[in-house]
Image (spheres, coloured by chain):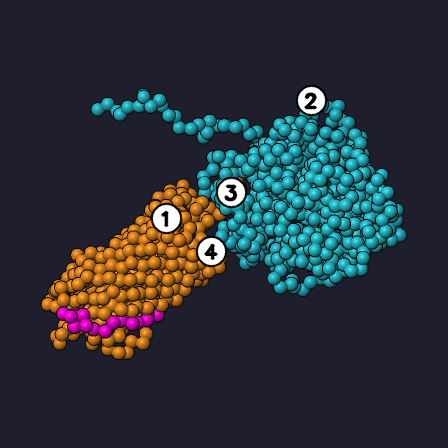
Chain colours: A orange, B cyan
Amino acid sequence: MIDSPSLRWILPVAIAFVAAGTTPSSAQVPPRFYWKSLVGGHAVPVIVTSMSGNANPVDPAHTVLPEASFEATVALAGYAHTFALFDRAAMAAVLVPMGRISGEASVSGRTFGEDASGYGDPLFEIDINLIGPDPIRNIPDLLRYEPGFSLDILADIAFPIGEYNNEEPLNLGQNRWYGRIGAPIVWQLGPWVPGRRTTLEFIPSLWLYGDNDDFVGHTLATEPMFQLDSHFTRDLVEDLWASLDVTWVSGGKASLDGVEGEPLKNIALGFTLGYQINDNLQLTMGYMATVNDSEPTDLRMDGFRVSLVFGWHPLVEGMKRLEK
Amino acid sequence: MLVLAFAATLSADERPNIVIILADDMGYSDMGSFGSEIQTPNLDALAEEGVRFTQFYTHASCSPTRSMLLSGTDTHVNGLGNMDEWTAPNQMGVPGYEGYLNDAVVTLPQILKQAGYHTYMTGKWHMGKAPDKIPRARGFERDFSLLDGGGNYWDMKNVTALSPRLVFTEDGYYLSELPKDYYATRTYTDKMIEFIEADRDDGKPFFAYVAHQAPHDPYHLPRAWRRRHVGEYDQGWDAVRRARLQRQIELGIVAKGTELAERMWFVPDPTQLAPASLALLGMKMELYAGMMENFDYHVGRLIDYLKSIGEYENTIFIAFGDNGAEGADLFEMIAGTPGTLNALSAAINWSQTHPKAWGDPGSFVSYGPMWAQVSMTPFSQYKGWLAEGGIRNALIVSGPTIQRDSGSIHQAVMHVADIMPTLLEIAGAEYPETHEGHRVPPLLGKSWVTMLAGETDSVRTDDDYLAWEIFGNRALRQGKWKLRWQWKPYGSGSWELFDLASDPGERRDLAGQRPERVAALLELWDDYVSTNNVILPSRSPFESLEDDMPQRFGQDPGYPPLIYKRQFVPPPDMVKEPKK
């Protein structure tokens, strides 16, 4: 007499948080990243990006190197975990960038043609919900979850232990501390029915950077940078969703030995498609490119991103074993 | 007699208006005034101003009840000897089994109309679709009616593939489309208010038959009404039933010491279910509760309107449900077989199965036997069956003819077929001997007028009996005794006897102990059969249940201990670490 057809909805929903994605780069998270799910869940993301532009793609400061041209294939792998903290939904994650970057750059009149490869700076993130539903502690909570208007606070910090060559401007490690604070917002528009979910999402954040005092013999300093990621997401069918993405960055003026560059004031537009392959696995693909980027000092960057996220929860896995 | 005299002295324009509020599949205990936790303040206000009746009987399914309400005659006479959807081969073509309200009878609105009443109907008809069978043809001046037996609240999409569109009429014409912003419960109310408003200055009283679909499945409900009971039903059906019974005892709806009917043998013990299962099933009941509250809200709108035009005080309200709560899964019955046309139609039109979509267009939620039993607290079984849970309903009557104490509760045995003679008497109208050139069958019921006036406690004598037959199930009640035959495994496949005074939950079959009583009641049954041309169906929707359902066992709390025994906890002072 138990309505087993209804139970089948539990599994994909429980996995949703991990499938929603993890950080695709150290500077930007994908849409639906801050949706909440069952406390006690785990996820392992693998995110591959192919990017080009005039700033180091793994540098969250987006420090523009005029006349530079970079190509990068970078992967991020990590782990995320959901839990309750002070009776609020929370998530902690760690992501480690790795990959290869190649290109040319000019710094203080010197032109560098180079390649870099290896591991970047691991980034740790903690996110706590302030306004919104209570933590999803069990499946009944999960069944009733709707974000409504949800506001979180997040903190990221990257540890400067990635590979770094002080003779080259292009590195996977940044040789300085950096991080950000932000306030992710998820605003549910309309019903919360798989196949019809629509959200407007904003992630305003402020990036803060320490100095790199050994940047090809110079000191690189960067002022704080404000970043606003916006997503309009919509389910196309139950397992497929799309998002229009806009990122606006402002500030982050870099200086080299006290010689100041120009602050950033850029917009990037993109889109993302997400597909739930099965209860555990979600695929996302996206593209994003800066616009109005014709000046040499403008940030110019574009890239494709493919992510594969495997998520699991002990309770859900147990239910699946019993179903088998 | 006082009321008769009162009615006789009224001039035409002083006669009371009549409003019948008929809920579809509402359970006995679903209104607050009958013990529910569901908030029904408007219906409860009617109960507080009027009177409640605790032993009111309808039929076990909708169109038979409606046929008796509007014709005052037995179903086997008026055309609904079986539901149109289940007419058996041996009943085909037999008068009394047409599947619609036949021409042998004259209807309540036809007589009231002739007596000078305006006659309005909104909501579900379910007694014929042909032009000469629709509400306009059967006495209603104005109507906005769903002719089908139920379905969509949002649009015209039907569930069955071969009848893909619901059929509606408005003022005698079939509708090609529904009004904008249609939602059944709201629109039926709007239309009724519109009808009354259009004629209100002409001084004639009106008869308003508001036959709501609510709370019949599918539980289609505006989103704003869906989150009023979040988590409330995760406690499971047994706890809610116990709480309702306790309130019923406190209110005086049932006697102290009343025992709940046993949980249906195939319904799980909720204490053994995982929280997720309870939550999923509880969410269906949350939706049902919202359906009831939305229904009550719109009843309140009609009441408020009547107050605003000064007609409330001169209006009789009769509110009840048409049969027991629905415990079957209608959607599964229709569309549950893969590869069928109905399954294909459901995939296209009715596949919003996610819990978050419950209530939306395209969803089809019904709450199942466990919650149907809650709705029918304290009784056994539900719609379609002739246990008390299938046929006993809550009844509220209020208005100017009531001379009894406001808010009082009465235990007289009453029947839906009583309503027609009651209203005819109140309206000063006569039931004719002939209609359109043919004799009409005699009225089955008895007028309540003297009882409402407080002159008698019951309109029935000890010798009177009530009887029912539908789908082959049979029952007869005389005084406190009830004789019942039901298909296995809901029944025993033989006649059972219950003492409803001491056992309203029908837990103890006394047929073996009281064979003389069984014999006496069987004589009455034979009288009922011959008087009303009862033909037992050669086929029944229940004919294979014994093979299809789990074997029936009694409910013994705590059995088996294997799953009920809790963790053994040793005395703390005897607990030690293992020796190394």
N-terminal of the pair, mark 1 or mark 4, is: 1
Q: Nearer the viewer, mark 1 or mark 4?
A: 1
Measure the alpha-carbon separation of dots 3 and 4. Answer: 21 Å
Magenta segment, prevailing SS (helix, strand or loop): strand
The answer to whether tags 3 and 1 share a subunit is: no
Q: At 40% across and 55% down in the image, what residue appears?
A: A150
Give the image location of residue B204, x and y in percent.
81, 56
- Give the residue at mark 3: B232
In the rendered structure, which disc, 2 or 3, sits on the residue that comes first in sequence?
3
Please say whether residue B388 is one of the residues in the magenta stretch: no
Q: CA distance from mark 3 to mark 1?
A: 22 Å
Foreground disc of the pair 4, 2: 4
Residue A19 seen in this snapshot: no
Q: Same chain for labels 4 and 2? Say yes or no.
A: no
The segment highlighted magenta reads A255-270
**Amino acid type, label 2:** Gln
Residue A262 lies in the magenta-colored region? yes
Residue, disc 2: B513
In the displayed structure, does residue A280 sit left or right of residue B126? left
Residues at marks 4 and 2, CA–CA distance in whole angstroms: 58 Å
Q: Is residue B314 above or below residue B411?
A: below
Q: Which mark is residue A192?
A: 4
Which residue position is annotated with label 1?
A88
Q: Residue B503 is drawn in which quadrant? A: top right
Mark 2 vs mark 3: give the one in front: 3
Q: Nearer the viewer, residue B404 or B137?
A: B404
